[in-house]
Amino acid sequence: MNPVNSYQSDMYPDANGHFGPYGGRYVAETLMPALIELEKAYTAHVPEPQFQKEFKLLLKNYTGRPTPIFFAQRLTTALGGASIYLKREDLTHTGAHKINNTVGQTLLAKWMGKKKIIAETGAGQHGVATATTAALFGMACKIFMGVEDIVRQAPNVKRMELLGAEVVPVESGTGTLKDAMNEALRYWVSAVRDTFYVIGSVAGPHPYPVMVREFQKIIGKEARVQIMEASGRLPDLLVACVGGGSNAMGLFHAFMNDPIDMLGVEAAGEGITTGKHAATLCAGSVGVLHGSKSYVLQDEYGQINEAHSISAGLDYPGVGPEHSLLKDFKRIQYVAIDDYQTLDAFSSLCRLEGIIPALESAHAVAAAMIEAKKRPKDDIILVNLSGRGDKDLGIVGPLL
Amino acid sequence: MNRINDAFTQLKQTKETALVGFVTAGDPDINTSLKIITAMCENGIDILELGVPFSDPTADGPVIQRSSARALQHNVSLKTVLEMIREIRTTTSIPIIIFSYYNPILAYGIDAFYPDAVDAGADGVLVVDLPMEEAGELTSQWPENEFSLINLVAPTTPKDRMDKIVKSASGFLYLVSKTGVTGSDGLDTTEVKTQMDILRSVTDLPVCVGFGISTVEDVAAVASLADGVVIGSAFERLIEKNIDSPDLVQMVGLVTAEYKHATK
């Protein structure tokens, strides 16, 4: 089967936000008018030349785009296989790809006349990025964050506070990303009339999955040109980690019609067989969580299971609906990398390349290292290094 | 036979407003829950809304979140809820509405749900995170009038959207009194009246109002505007507060009678 012909990315989503059987808007009626208003504003404003001009100028001068691609020569040599290139999203302002999307959404909020911003965060990268753009536009900002994540990603909590955001601790459930999103949705129901909810991934109800993809697709657009310049041809394989899936969609989208392989890397946590993982696409089933239909981790009665990962940004029992469709089409292959493999890759990148990756991104690096060994030397692998790892020193320190 | 229509017809004749009582099924445990529900039925609720516990109740405030968590500790599933309805149905003829998030229904199977729910004795379902745009998948095969999908109308729902909602609605409409989650404070009857007036202009269906109604005074105020008053978090708060009391069931019965009195 030729994967390129089977998945027509321009066909999705449909008018109601469906990616085939996935996506849609599964929310309380109170939120529906707000989502419809958002969809209208997104459709009307984002394509406008003035919006695009402002957006691109901010991406260039504020977030520091384009980010480079970097040939990881020592890592490549150490593995003895395919060449590994890194798309350096870790070099953006605030240190992760998340800022691309928050610049886009906060700009849209400004165009819509909203003055209050809320967001959920797991690792804190989306929270920091949202707090940053809220500060830039002079908007009030509340970030919902699980208590467990507040402990394990403490530096990012301090950053958000310095940027003027209020960090709201979420104690329900396991105190992780899922619970933060529950609470953000609850708050949004009460404040929907004047508040813009900046969702951080290609998840949630329509139009978020498509909107976040469109704001993140700059990653792949740049990378496609850069890799052509660097190597004279397209890569053979793209690799990105998948929690909700925004950095993966961001990299993959521009290559969707190219005849190349794509690998989405989920978190296997302590191992898929232990049940303590966040490998939604590899080990989940179809359900509805946080406003859209997609693969989720759940029991036979439809109760959502807790996810587990060393990486707070991947510690989520859902995934963006477009990934679910891409899995069904077999356009993207999804694999899972456990905590130990992740730490090993984290260490390798630190020592061989002088780059401290985010634990999320280290999952992608780990999968790329496995693939590189299997592939011939003239193959090219392009990895999305979605964020930097300073925030993870508290977790990694005692383990390495 | 349509128990929902019959109930509203009868209430109209006696000039009463429906008291709609919500509890989470299986809270604090299945047996006590069944006793609580029986006490509510015996003391005057006109419609029962039975909540299916869910791990991630994003439209609910802390009180119902905790009630859901307690029921889940007893592994209460949609299947359990249908079994409970079958038992409740042997002692009451009031309408029973299943109140659920969509995922437990999806996991149960949308094809099996309808016949099993009707067979157990339920009269309708309210799916809190299933707006009309997505409801077709669930309801497209249902025969009309036998089983209702209860639609929600929110304070944010504009008139043109209400128009569309009422076209596919049956049974009654559930008007959310305020922007917020269940159990929020501060009932604003002026806002309720504004939405009620618009809603009345687009439909003849009965309208029940819920969210944030907790005192007898609230009930009386809303009863003068609507066809039904929904009490949920207030019952759950009572259950939580008296969870270890031997008088819990009796207390729920007494409070139900007080609420019912305010609807007459």
Image (cartoon, coloured by chain):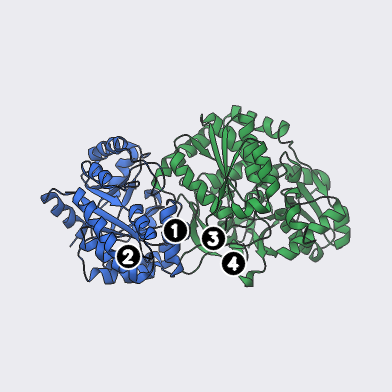
Name which quarter of the figure residue A368 lies in.
bottom right
**Disc 2 element:** helix
Is there one chain holding both mark 1 and mark 2?
yes
Q: What amino acid is labelled 3 in the image?
A: Tyr
Q: What amino acid is labelled 2 in the image?
A: Tyr
Q: Which mark is residue B66?
A: 1
Q: Is residue A54 above or below residue B102?
A: above
Q: What amino acid is labelled 1 in the image?
A: Arg
Q: CA distance from mark 4 to mark 3?
A: 9 Å
Foreground mark, 1 or 2?
Answer: 1
> Could you say where residue B5 lies in the image, as x and y percent from the top left?
19, 55
| Front residue (pair A268, B224) | B224
| Label 3 packing within 10 angstroms: few (<14), some (14-19), many (20+) | many
Is there one chain holding both mark 4 and mark 3?
yes
Q: CA distance from mark 2 to mark 3?
A: 24 Å
Q: CA distance from mark 4 to mark 1?
A: 29 Å
> Could you say where residue B134 lies in the image, as x and y percent from the top left?
40, 52
Q: Label 3 marks which chain's residue?
A: A
The tint of chain B in the picture is blue
**Disc 4 element:** helix
User: Residue, x 47% and y 60% (percent of image)?
Assistant: B55
Q: Which mark is residue A283?
A: 4
Residue at the far top in the pictured view? A50
Residue occupied by mark 3: A295
* Quadrant in which the N terminus of chain B appears: bottom left
Q: Is residue A157 left or right of residue B202?
A: right
**Disc 1 element:** helix
